[in-house]
Amino acid sequence: MKLGKLSESALKKSVLSPAGLEKDVFPSVDGQGIEIPEGYELVVTTDPITNARSYLPELGIYNGINDLAVCGAKPVGLTLTILLTEREREIYLSRFMKRVQEICQAESLRILGGHTEVTDAITRPLVSVTMFGIRKKGHPQVKLRKDEKRKGLEIIMAGALGVEGTAILATDRKEQMAKRFTPGFVRQCQDFIFNLSVRRAAEILGPNSYYLHDLSEGGIYAGLWELGEALHTGFEVVLKDFVIRQETIEVCELFDLNPYGLVSGGCLLGVTDHGEEVVEELREAGILAKIIGHLTDGSDRLMIMGEQKRFLDPPKSVNNCIYWNVAKKEEKKC
């Protein structure tokens, strides 16, 4: 496609038509309104997807849905910014928007607008999703006062860590995967992309939790640190209790990556005072879940590994681009 903003004919053919928006979105209209019911407030989140080549619709939309879910908000609509290179053809964009439409239909979301452009400022397609949701006014994301006791509150992990990164690697590095693993194993890893939503887990955990946090860049290490910062507290977690699939471990071994730092959409952390009941309810809903630790009165953030205890370090600048990490490791081996 040619550099610049899409022509009106290309926009109608490859964006609006595949998404079923011919009658709802008009190129000449610059915005749309969202009606907020009385007693509710608007919640907005945005995420650019920079760590993958495949599954951009899934990654972009479910990142937004997950962010809203942990805020106690119901997603109602989204806008998309899609940036493409000259190498992409209109059929790529058409398929992209068809997938966006399928996800939005499944999740009862409206596509409110967006922007699509071909640019030489990037080396691969990028998408940024802004998600809009509503929740009752006065809904606190952290239900603990700074002076309230924290010691003994349990940390629950719902959903397996690293499934997002596993799916990305199994698709974008499938040739390397095929040299070690069976086709069935590779397909199974690719299908992890359908496990990205934490919406149901948040619905179960939310009413029973003091705090929710969905994992993303930086994996469980970054997620735990962010939990400690949000609650102004220390904690102890047990490494062997982390919920992780064997497939993720094997894929990370192949690419020499740390599974605990792998991008982890689809995994949720919650803090509660009745962990066993909540874990049982999550499991009954078909969600992998475990109590992985508890909060402490101090500020130390500790991971227990067998007989050893290790301090969790604050996350450095997270370079979560899987390509960059894998490429750098391959470079060193040459």
Image (tube, rainbow, N blue to C red):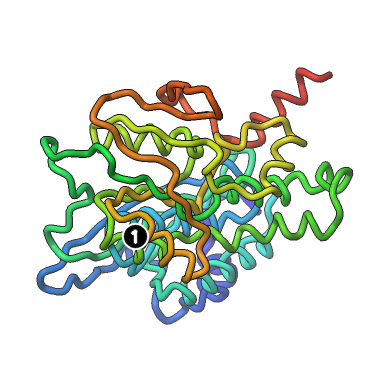
Graded by Cα atoms within 10 Å as few (under 14), some (14 to 19) or many (20 or more), the crowding at tag 1 reads: many
307 sits left or right of 326 in the view: left
Quadrant of res 278? bottom left
164 sits left or right of 21 in the view: right
Question: Outermost residue, right direction?
Answer: 179
> Identity of the amino acid at label 1?
Leu
> Residue drawn at (61%, 61%), measured in percent from left and top?
93
Question: Outermost residue, bottom direction?
Answer: 23
Name the residue nearer the viewer: 19 or 148. 148
198 sits left or right of 243 in the view: left
- Which residue is identified by label 1? 205
Residue 2 is situated, as x and y percent measured from the top left of the image, at 63, 51
> Residue drawn at (22%, 64%), measured in percent from left and top?
135
Residue 280 is situated, as x and y percent measured from the top left of the image, at 43, 64
> Residue drawn at (64%, 67%), measured in percent from left and top?
95
Vertical relation: 167 (above or below) 42? above
